[in-house]
Amino acid sequence: MSGHSKWANIKHKKEKTDAQRAKVFTKIGKEITIAVKEGGGDPNSNAKLRDLIAKAKSNNVPNDNIERTIKKALGGTGENYEEVVYEGYGPAGVAVIVEATTDNRNRTAGNVRSYFSKYHGNMGQSGCVGFMFEEKGVIVIADEDGVVDEDQLMETALEFGASDFSGEDGIYEIYTEPDDVYAVAEALKDAGYTFESAEKTKLPTTSVTLDNEDDIKFMNLLIEKLEEDDDVMEVYHNWENCD
């Protein structure tokens, strides 16, 4: 299973500054707010909230922040966010999916459309590129000190319910079905492993390689501007050789 795009995203995430981490906390808070308002504040009966709490913890969001966000949403004082998905094409036909949470759909759609247009892409209709991706759970373990036994990790992960495994240069990616990712991550944590991230994601089934310098420049700018937008939660693409 190809992990090129995913690994580039992982490297990017590992380099986040404190300000960027704070932004991640804010974005997860929006997701939790939506989940609570849709299904209540009890993670035992709200599977979406349960997954988001696990996602928050995997991103090192403090428990106090999580509890405060849930209470605020239950009290009806949180913002009224909705989830929206945009699809389109970057330079040279790179497929792009943008997941956002917003309290102003017109603002968010306008911003996303302008990013596509400015950086030599175009926003398309719903479903225009979604079929090029498959949903998976991905757990990333970084073995910078070389202490992880790869064969043992693979055996343990598969035993706990993982569906696939890859390792390269001390970075191990464990793939699961989307709804299994947090359970597998918790099992690995209980087994003594520390992971960089555990999340549901969209992996491309086909990829595009960019050779033209302008295409590479504009694709990088498109991803950067989308990820900087406060409304944007996740950006997925099938550019294989992104750096």
Image (spheres, helix red, strand yellow):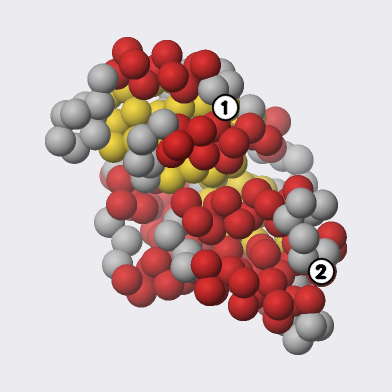
Residue 231 appears anywhere in the view: no
Quarter of the image for residue 216 reads top left
Q: Which dot marks residue 37?
A: 2
Q: Which residue is mark 1?
A: 176
Q: Is residue 215 left or right of residue 178?
A: left
Mark 2 → mark 1, Cα distance in angstroms: 28 Å
Quarter of the image for residue 43 reads bottom right
Q: Is residue 147 left or right of residue 178?
A: left
Of callouts 2 and 1, the N-terminal one: 2
Residue 219 horizontal/vertical position (percent): 42, 50
Front in this rendered view, residue 150 or 5: 150
Residue 213 appears anywhere in the view: yes
Quarter of the image for residue 66 reads bottom right
Position above or below: 72 against 61: below
Q: Amino acid at mark 1?
A: Thr
Q: Residue at x 66, y 63 (%)?
A: 31
Q: Residue at x 43, y 60 (%)?
A: 60
Secondary structure at badge 2 equals: helix
Residue 8 horizontal/vertical position (percent): 35, 41
Say which quadrant the C terminus sits in: top left
Q: Residue at x 32, y 71 (%)?
A: 18
Residue 27 horizontal/vertical position (percent): 56, 67
Q: Residue at x 71, y 77 (%)?
A: 71
Q: Amino acid at mark 2?
A: Lys
Front in this rendered view, residue 23 or 112: 23
Badge 2 local density, few (<14 within 10 Å), some, or many (20+)? some
Badge 1 local density, few (<14 within 10 Å), some, or many (20+)? many
Q: Is residue 121 left or right of residue 109?
A: left
Q: Residue furthest left?
A: 145
